[in-house]
Image (cartoon, helix red, strand yellow):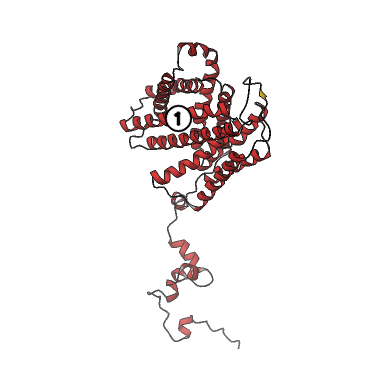
């Protein structure tokens, strides 16, 4: 007679215990997720817990999953990089116009006035759209910024009268972020990290190298300006140019700090309205300076009439460059946008070599590239 297979008793029944459902969780049910993930909610080692967990837990909404992910700052896109690169080229372009007509005493006044004229159409558009008037504190910042920028403009044009584009432009553009960071430390109690200190040291090393290195040969006649540059024929003239470049850098750092304080004011001023008011203060302070020196006369105005179209172009380049930076800031990280603007430093050396026939030797190239690298690190 064949043996009947005996029915297998449940595990608890074989041990002499009653197979009743568990009301209390087992110890391993309370284990952390990394140790008891497969055994959660009473599951076994073969994955029952995972199935039970999937069946009992509510679905996780997709919107909540996206909200739980860490937010990563958007990188600088090719569009932003192109905008900033074009802005740097426009900045070098209007500096090239200033270098080409450096013998004109009213050059800085013409550029400032042209910049104000170019800003009038955007201001009218914003006024028609209902832009709020500027607060008194913001107008005060605009006046301060206009006064400091007057110093920067006058120092820049004076530097171009005594030295080369390939010397003045890298020094003024490279030292300005360093001075702004130093001023922010003392004025706004901002802290400078170790990497920023290294960047400051690199910029100062490049600026010192550019200022102290001796010229290898005098600059030849410039067909664009019709005058012979004397910046590299005398050490005294070179140091005058270095001093004017440092003064221009101080002015640039000063009005950047003032503009930042104004645009971060609690009243949230309109950008185009603020910059038009600031530009009008700039023209007013510069006109007052030229009137005191008796350089802004009717005879001088008649003399510069042929330069008006070229200076209007310079003003358009100046304001368009800043407008492109504003567009680029909406595309990517602000630090990289600001750093990319300083690619105009090697551009200025190329323009000085090709257009004005300035003697830019290997040490000057190395010093300018060192300044550029420091500014990129600082940003």
Q: Secondary structure at mark 1?
A: helix
Q: Where is residue 285, by image quadrant? A: top left
Q: Position of residue 215 (x, y in %)?
A: 65, 35
Q: Position of residue 99 (x, y in %)?
A: 58, 25
Determine whether, in the image, residue 118 is placed left or right of residue 128: right
> Which residue does the numbered mark 1 point to in the structure image?
151
Kindly identify the residue that appears in the image at 55 percent across and 24 percent down. Answer: 98
Query: Compared with residue 97, is residue 42 higher up or lower down, i.e. above or below?
Result: below
Q: Nearer the viewer, residue 48 or 112?
A: 112
Q: Where is residue 4, by image quadrant? A: bottom right
Q: Nearer the viewer, residue 224 or 330?
A: 224
Q: Residues within 10 Å of mark 1 (few under 14, many from 20)?
A: many
Determine whether, in the image, residue 246 is placed left or right of residue 144: right
Kindly identify the residue that appears in the image at 54 percent across and 48 percent down. Answer: 201
Q: Position of residue 313 (x, y in %)?
A: 54, 20
Query: Compared with residue 31, is residue 306 higher up or lower down, i.e. above or below?
Result: above
Q: Where is residue 268, by image quadrant? A: top left
Query: Compared with residue 162, is residue 196 higher up or lower down, i.e. above or below?
Result: below
- For the question of whether residue 278 can be seen, the reply is yes
Q: Residue furthest bottom?
A: 1
Query: Compared with residue 48, is residue 231 higher up or lower down, i.e. above or below?
Result: above
Determine whether, in the image, residue 266 is placed left or right of residue 204: left
Kindly identify the residue that appears in the image at 42 percent across and 18 percent down. Answer: 291
């Amino acid at each position: 007679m064949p043996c009947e297979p005996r029915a297998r008793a449940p595990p608890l029944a074989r041990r002499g215990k009653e197979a009743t459902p568990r009301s209390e969780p087992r110890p391993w049910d309370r284990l952390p997720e990394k140790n008891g993930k497969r055994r959660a909610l009473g599951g076994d080692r073969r994955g029952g817990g995972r199935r039970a967990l999937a069946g009992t837990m509510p679905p996780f909404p997709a919107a909540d999953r996206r909200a739980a992910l860490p937010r990563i700052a958007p990188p600088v896109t090719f569009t932003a990089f192109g905008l900033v690169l074009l802005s740097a080229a426009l900045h070098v372009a209007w500096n090239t116009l200033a270098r080409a007509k450096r013998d004109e005493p009213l050059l800085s006044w013409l550029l400032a006035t042209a910049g104000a004229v170019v800003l009038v159409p955007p201001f009218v558009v914003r006024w028609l759209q209902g832009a709020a008037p500027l607060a008194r504190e913001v107008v005060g910042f605009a006046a301060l910024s206009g006064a400091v920028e007057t110093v920067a403009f006058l120092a820049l044009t004076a530097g171009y009268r005594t030295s080369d584009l390939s010397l003045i432009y890298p020094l003024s553009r490279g030292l300005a972020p360093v001075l702004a960071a130093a001023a922010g430390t003392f004025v706004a109690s901002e802290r400078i990290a170790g990497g920023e200190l290294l960047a400051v040291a690199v910029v100062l090393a490049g600026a010192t190298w550019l200022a102290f290195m001796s010229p290898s040969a005098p600059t030849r006649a410039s067909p664009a300006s019709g005058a012979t540059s004397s910046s590299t024929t005398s050490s005294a003239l070179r140091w005058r140019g270095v001093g004017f470049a440092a003064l221009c850098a101080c002015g640039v750092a000063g009005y950047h700090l003032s503009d930042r304080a104004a645009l971060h004011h609690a009243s949230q001023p309109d950008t185009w309205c603020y910059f038009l008011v600031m530009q009008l203060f700039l023209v007013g302070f510069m006109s007052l300076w030229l009137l005191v020196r008796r350089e802004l006369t009717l005879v001088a105005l008649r003399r510069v009439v042929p330069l008006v179209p070229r200076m209007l172009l310079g003003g358009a380049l100046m304001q368009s460059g800043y407008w492109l930076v504003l567009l680029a800031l909406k595309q990517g990280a602000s630090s990289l946008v600001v750093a990319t603007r300083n690619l105009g430093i090697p551009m200025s050396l190329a323009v000085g070599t090709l257009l004005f026939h300035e003697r830019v030797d290997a040490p000057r190239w190395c010093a300018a590239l060192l300044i550029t690298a420091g500014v990129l690190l600082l940003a």
